[in-house]
């Protein structure tokens, strides 16, 4: 066992608690020490509540000593993205416009389920303003920096959660994903991030970005992501779109491997430009999945870039975000958010209805694609992390974030489960991610395929904690 409990997975921590090798108090102290040492450089957190976390850890320790753990996550250090409600904590959403808002009175459903299972909540992780873009900086001055190189972006919008996971500032992390916001930072940071099937994890309050927006787990291992999903999933009366319980234990077939699975490998989805180093790393991993028994075929799904479709649905959500901000505070909003909100506000109802019809056609197309294949493999991102405090790479620092994330947002449109796992590093030492997608409701299958890929590239800690 590692000498630093902050580096253990949730599964390993639970084993240590069960056998008495370590206690929740020791684990939480280790994570808080890691936060104290590194967060001023990497910016993962907007709020840390060490006193409350240690009190919860002491209660967990008492239960474990009595042989009566509260639930499946008793004593596991956990974080929550600062778009999601936690009772007793403010929800700043990375915005100056929320200053003075009272703390939340209730937990969001996913948080309530983690708490009921015994998870110890450490704090809230950094987000761009209202989670609107694919990098993590905001008008409050908070910046989540890449755990492999703090000069670079961690991605977004769940950038703080990805940084916390990679650097051992907690084992489990709630992220949100409306166009790639779990998978983008997970890919840039070298961790696991799952966007489940839409509705698998209940959401409340509803996102202004509507049915594009998902909640899901972020962690250092696929096993931890599956464990976390088991706890968070299921219907809830406050989310009328939440899915019924599918009766699956997401860890049950995790180690069944990929033998017999039909994997479609699409290096570009037919339209994306991909860095050669990224493409090579992804291809090597997919080829090795074939050696493990999968049938691999290079095949594009056969749709054109849905970027403009995505924008026609995303921008009105941004307009809704801005509309509820008091007029006197709007000048302080992120200029990029104000720009896309203005575009969204100009859309007509008929345009939105047409976009919904086009979205349905894309979703049906992808469901039919998965009659031929079990899993689609793509790069998570077409590039490695770029400079922090930029919305886009290269000279176009203020460009549209979705233009450089061509592999993520299509599967928010289709609502299908998609996961990213590490598949190597660039010559500069930066993480590269493999994305695995499957048909709607096949969350267990993408976890199983991801677990097989993970055996080829286990989590490696960044230099700051190695």
Image (cartoon, helix red, strand yellow):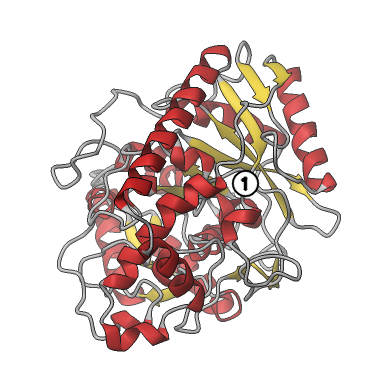
327 to 458, vertically: above or below: below
Depth check: give the residue in front, 27 or 453. Answer: 453
- In the picture, the quarter occupied by the C terminus is bottom right
User: x and y percent of residue 31 in the render?
Assistant: 48, 66
7 to 10, vertically: above or below: below
User: x and y percent of residue 120 in the render?
Assistant: 33, 59
Depth check: give the residue in front, 50 or 269. Answer: 269
Depth check: give the residue in front, 51 or 151. Answer: 151
The reply, left or right, for residue 311 in relation to residue 90 is right
The reply, left or right, for residue 166 in relation to residue 294 is left
Residue 114: in sight, yes or no?
A: yes
Crowdedness near tag 1: few (<14), some (14–19) or many (≥20) residues, C-alpha within 10 Å: many
User: x and y percent of residue 159 in the render?
Assistant: 53, 63
Residue 45: in sight, yes or no?
A: no
199 to 248, vertically: above or below: below
> Which residue is labeled 1 in the image?
406
Which residue is rendered at x = 42% and y = 23% of the image? 252
The reply, left or right, for residue 287 in relation to residue 379 is right
Depth check: give the residue in front, 368 or 170. Answer: 368
Which residue is rendered at x = 24% and y = 60% of the image? 59
Which residue is rendered at x = 25% and y = 54% of the image? 206
Q: How many marks?
A: 1
Q: Quadrant of residue 134?
A: bottom right
Under tag 1, what secondary structure? loop
User: x and y percent of residue 67 in the render?
Assistant: 26, 43
Q: Quadrant of residue 25?
A: bottom left
Which residue is rendered at x = 38% and y = 54% of the image? 76
């Amino acid at each position: 066992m590692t000498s630093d409990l902050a580096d253990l997975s949730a599964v390993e921590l639970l084993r240590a608690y069960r056998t008495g090798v370590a206690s929740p108090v020791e684990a939480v102290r280790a994570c808080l020490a890691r936060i104290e040492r590194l967060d001023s450089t990497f910016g993962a957190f907007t709020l840390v509540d060490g006193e409350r976390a240690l009190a919860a850890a002491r209660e967990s320790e008492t239960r474990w000593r009595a042989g009566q753990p509260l639930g499946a996550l008793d004593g596991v250090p956990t974080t929550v993205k600062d778009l999601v409600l936690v009772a007793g904590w403010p929800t700043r959403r990375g915005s100056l416009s929320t200053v003075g808002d009272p703390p939340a009175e209730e937990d969001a459903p996913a948080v309530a389920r983690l708490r009921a299972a015994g998870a110890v909540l450490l704090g809230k992780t950094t987000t761009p303003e209202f989670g609107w873009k694919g990098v993590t900086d905001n008008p409050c001055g908070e910046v989540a920096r890449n755990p492999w190189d703090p000069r670079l972006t961690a991605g977004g919008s769940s950038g703080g959660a990805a940084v916390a996971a990679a650097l051992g500032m907690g084992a489990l992390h709630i992220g949100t994903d409306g166009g790639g916001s779990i998978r983008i930072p997970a890919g840039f940071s070298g961790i696991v991030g799952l966007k489940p099937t839409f509705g698998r994890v209940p959401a409340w309050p509803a996102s202004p970005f509507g049915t594009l927006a998902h909640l899901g787990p972020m962690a250092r291992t696929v096993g931890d992501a599956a464990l976390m999903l088991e706890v968070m999933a299921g219907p809830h009366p406050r989310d009328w779109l939440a899915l019924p319980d599918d009766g699956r234990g997401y860890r049950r077939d995790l180690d069944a491997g990929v033998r017999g699975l039909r994997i479609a490998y699409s290096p570009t989805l037919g339209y994306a430009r991909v860095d050669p180093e990224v493409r090579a790393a992804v291809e090597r991993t997919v080829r090795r999945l074939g050696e493990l028994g999968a049938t691999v075929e290079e095949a594009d799904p056969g749709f054109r870039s849905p970027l403009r479709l995505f924008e026609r649905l995303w921008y009105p959500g941004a307009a809704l975000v801005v509309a509820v901000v008091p007029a006197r505070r709007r000048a302080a909003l992120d200029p990029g958010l104000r720009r896309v909100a203005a575009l969204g506000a100009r859309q007509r109802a008929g345009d939105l209805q047409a976009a919904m019809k086009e979205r349905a056609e894309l979703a049906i197309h992808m469901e039919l694609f998965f009659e031929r294949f079990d899993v689609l493999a793509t790069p998570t991102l077409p590039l490695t992390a770029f400079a922090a405090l930029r919305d886009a790479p290269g000279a176009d620092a203020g460009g549209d974030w979705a233009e450089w994330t061509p592999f993520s947002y299509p599967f928010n449109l289709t609502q299908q489960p998609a996961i990213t796992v590490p598949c190597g590093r660039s010559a500069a030492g930066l993480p590269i991610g493999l994305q695995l997608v499957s048909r709607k409701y096949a969350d267990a299958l993408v976890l199983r395929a991801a677990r097989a890929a993970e055996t080829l590239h286990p989590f490696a800690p960044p230099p700051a904690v190695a």
